Amino acid sequence: MLEKRIESAFVKATQKRGGLCLKFVSPSMAGVPDRVVLLPDGHMGFVEMKAPGNHPRPLQIQRINQVKELGFQVFVCDQLSQIGGMLDAIQAS
């Protein structure tokens, strides 16, 4: 399964919950998570998308940790089965 398929499913699942799953690109900072998830009532999280079995690169891990240190939720999604739980966790925050 390709990363694009997981990413597309994540976007659709977010939209079904009334939210936005925005592509996050920062020209001045490499390694940021792929998606910013915005859900109703001010819930927000970041998601790094990966193909099944793949892991974040060292720079991506560094960026994930920086974002977490600021108090934001960051997830790494490499399976379709993870999507619902990740969205639940974002909504619960």
Image (spheres, grey):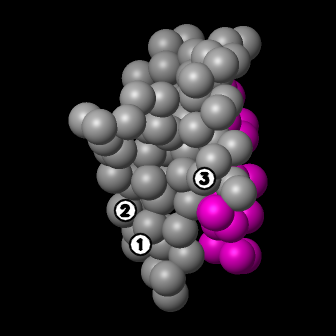
- The quadrant in which the N terminus is found is top right
Q: Nearer the viewer, mark 3 or mark 2?
A: 3
Which residue in the protein does label 3 denote? 67
User: Could one spot residue 5 in this view of the protein?
Assistant: no
Q: Amino acid at mark 1?
A: Gly
Which residue in the protein does label 2 denote? 20
In depth, the one of 29 and 87 nearer the eye is 29
Above or below residue 63? Residue 41 is below
Q: Nearer the viewer, mark 1 or mark 3?
A: 3
The residue drawn where x is 47% and y is 37% is 32
Query: Is the residue marked by circle 3 packed among few (<14), some (14-19), or many (20+) residues within 10 Å?
Result: some
Q: Amino acid at mark 2?
A: Leu
Q: What count of labels does the image hold? A: 3
**Residue 89 sits inside the magenta stretch:** yes
**Residue 11 sits inside the magenta stretch:** no
Q: Nearer the viewer, mark 1 or mark 2?
A: 2
Which residue in the protein does label 1 denote? 18
| The residue positioned farthest toward the front in the image shown | 28
Which picture quadrant has residue 27? top left
